[in-house]
Amino acid sequence: MDLDKTAEAPEVSVIVPTIDEAENLPTLVERIASALAGRRFEVLIVDDNSRDRTPEVCAALARTFPLKLLVRLKPANGLSGAILHGMAQARGDILCVMDADLQHPPEELPELMAPLLNGTADFVIGSRYAAGGSTETRWGFLRKINSTVATLLARPFAGRVTDPMSGFFALKRQTYLGARNLTPLGYKIALELMCKIGVSRPAEIPIHFGIRSKGESKLSLKEQFHYLEHLSRLYDFKFPRTSPVVKFLIATGLGWLAGYGGYLGLLNQGPVVGVFVGYIAALLVGAFFQARYIKTQREFMARQTPWLDFAIISAAEWAAATATAFWGERRLWWPENGELFVLAFGAATLVRYVLRKEFLQDIRGLRRSPRDER
């Protein structure tokens, strides 16, 4: 049967994001129904415009189970966006999220909800790494290193949670409604929610993380880059003053390294020429960071001409570096090559810092809401 607003509200909403997971849905929904027998529940399949038989399969399942299909014809923000779309439509007091590939065990749903029901936690994660948890397959050394580093990078938002990137988690509706400035990106929506809600009492239950039954994994190198971009947003939110300064120093430091290489390569043409050309290398590094910045933060920008602003700032930096090198070579008494480089690039960096603030190119904790919410 399909769900409607006149039906009795469920206690639990199970939100399942999908892309081409039709083969797994019958088994998944049957196992969810068995695990939640005796409770009022709904299963929300949030589909990002699959090309398989997902609509037909869901229509058949809805005749037996309390299932509703939500199709996003123009998906945005990946799996995280799909989950938030489902949460906005959910009617249950408890919201559970899990994948459709049968790697998350539906049988653990009662255990996942228990800390919420007894009031000992406000966010519960099904963890592969908690005591008693396990995975079906053995990971190689590089995969383990990748997971360990990702977990460490998430520690400022997740505390001592062992599996903050898990896609199997639960929270109460009221807790979800307390989230602010949600900016989902990629797969790690649990981390986003924990940070933006300000979870103070997380809990974990051990799970066995199984092998994908059918279909293909959605994890890719692109999603790993999305994770780094997502972390950047979360660091801005959590540390609104420190994070932009640190990122400015990293980008500037890498630019100095590239510029110094160009400077040394052209010293035989004179230090002014070395600075003039070397700073082009520094600006190319800055352009790379600018491109990533615009791609991930555009909806939060106060000005709508980021590349024009970048060009103006870059021209001013370049002019400042060249002018300072020209002045230093003629007015200082036998300046060392390294001293002249530091003086020229230091002047340019000061210009960059001042103008970036004037052109509002530093995001301070994503305090502005997306434009469609203004």
Image (spheres, helix red, strand yellow):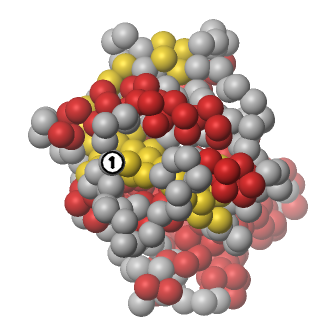
Question: Residue 159: where, in percent of width, then height?
Answer: 28, 35
Return the residue found at the far left.
119
**Could you tell me which residue is drawn at 42 percent across and 15 percent down?**
133
**Could you tell me which residue is drawn at 64 percent across and 89 percent down?**
305
Q: Is residue 244 visible?
A: no
Q: Residue 277 sits in which quadrant?
A: bottom right
Q: Residue 75 sits in which quadrant?
A: bottom right
Mark 1 residue crowding within 10 angstroms, few (<14) / some (14–19) / many (20+): some
**Could you tell me which residue is drawn at 27 percent across and 55 percent down?**
93
Question: Residue 151: where, in percent of width, then height?
Answer: 45, 31
Q: Which quadrant is the C terminus positioned in?
A: bottom left
Q: Residue 368 sits in which quadrant?
A: bottom left
Residue 51 in the image: above or below residue 36: below
Relative to the observer, which residue lies in front, 165 or 108? 108
Relative to the observer, which residue lies in front, 122 or 1? 1
Q: Looking at numbered disc 1 in the image, what kind of residue is underneath it?
A: Arg
Question: Residue 121: where, in percent of width, then height?
Answer: 18, 38
Relative to the observer, which residue lies in front, 26 or 89? 26
Q: Is residue 361 visible?
A: yes
Residue 315 in the image: above or below residue 76: below
**Could you tell me which residue is drawn at 60 percent across and 89 percent down?**
304
Position of 308 with respect to 229 (left or right) is right
Position of 316 with respect to 270 (left or right) is left
Count of numbered circles on the image: 1
The secondary element bearing badge 1 is classed as loop
> What residue would you read off at disc 1?
40
Relative to the observer, which residue lies in front, 96 or 227? 96
Question: Residue 20: where, in percent of width, then height?
Answer: 76, 47
